[in-house]
Amino acid sequence: MAEIHPELTFNVAQNNNIAVFATLCGIIFIFQILFTSVPFSILSIWALIMIILCLFRFFIGLRLLKCTEANSEWEKTSLLFILSVSLGGFGFGFTAVMAEFYSTVQEQLFIFALMLGFSGGAIATLSPIIQAYIAYVIGIMVPQVLALLFSSSNANLFDSEDLERLVGILHV
């Protein structure tokens, strides 16, 4: 596994505020998309948990800025940062599960494409700490894959013409 260096974590921590802001915007956007189809209690609990995770990531990022050399405090803070990122990714991935059970195929496809966008966008803010990036993307992708594998027969994305078109566009 690649080694983490204090100067790389410092660079990631400097960009963390922008990433947290983008995450909050994504939460609001997803809330609006799923508002009409997902039960309000489930969606609001998801949004609240995601906001708490954003605040956790924000404060861990601030703490990471103070760590300038490799020591036990820096190690602990780096691991907490990776944990905060992976939990945030998992929270975003969970939107695919909500969409699979409650939304139309079009909304499911849009959420899928949005998660691909979040995964791609994370390269800009998380790539110096490759472990954080991988944890984030795995967090996003695992719930989506599970939602597709265990999808109900009446909303199966594998039989969707819309999915075939989206996959074609994504391949290009």
Image: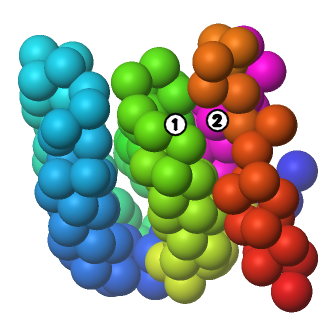
Separation of disc 2 and disc 1 at Cα? 5 Å
Asked where in the image residue 113 lies, by quadrant, the reply is bottom right
Q: Observer-nearest residue: 94 or 70? A: 94
- Label 2–label 1 contact, CB within 8 A: yes
Compared to residue 90, the image places residue 41 above or below, namely: above
- Of the pair 20 and 45, the residue shown nearer to us: 45
Q: Residues within 10 Å of mark 1 (few under 14, many from 20)?
A: many
Q: Of helix, strand and loop, which one carries label 1?
A: helix
Instruction: Find residue 97 and report its horizontal and vertical position in percent.
Output: 51, 26
Which residue does the image show at 79% across and 21% down from the upper left?
A: 149
The answer to if 141 sits in the magenta stretch is yes
Q: Is residue 162 visible?
A: yes
Q: Which image quadrant for residue 51?
A: top left
Please give the label number shown on residue 96: 1
Q: Position of residue 101 (x, y in %)?
A: 47, 20
Q: From which residue to which does the magenta span run?
A: 135-150
- Judge left or right: residue 148 versus residue 104: right
Secondary structure mainly formed by the magenta segment: helix
Side of 135 relative to 61 (left or right): right
Residue 62: x %, y % from top left: 21, 63
Q: Nearer the viewer, residue 135 or 151?
A: 151
**Is 119 part of what is drawn in magenta?**
no
Q: Which mark is residue 144?
A: 2
The residue under the point 23% across, 61% down is: 29
Reading the chain from its start, which is encountered first: label 2 or label 1? 1
Q: Looking at numbered disc 1 in the image, what kind of residue is underneath it?
A: Ala
Check disc 2 and give the amino acid type: Gln
Residue 161's spot in the image, x, y percent? Answer: 77, 54
SS label for mark 2 = helix
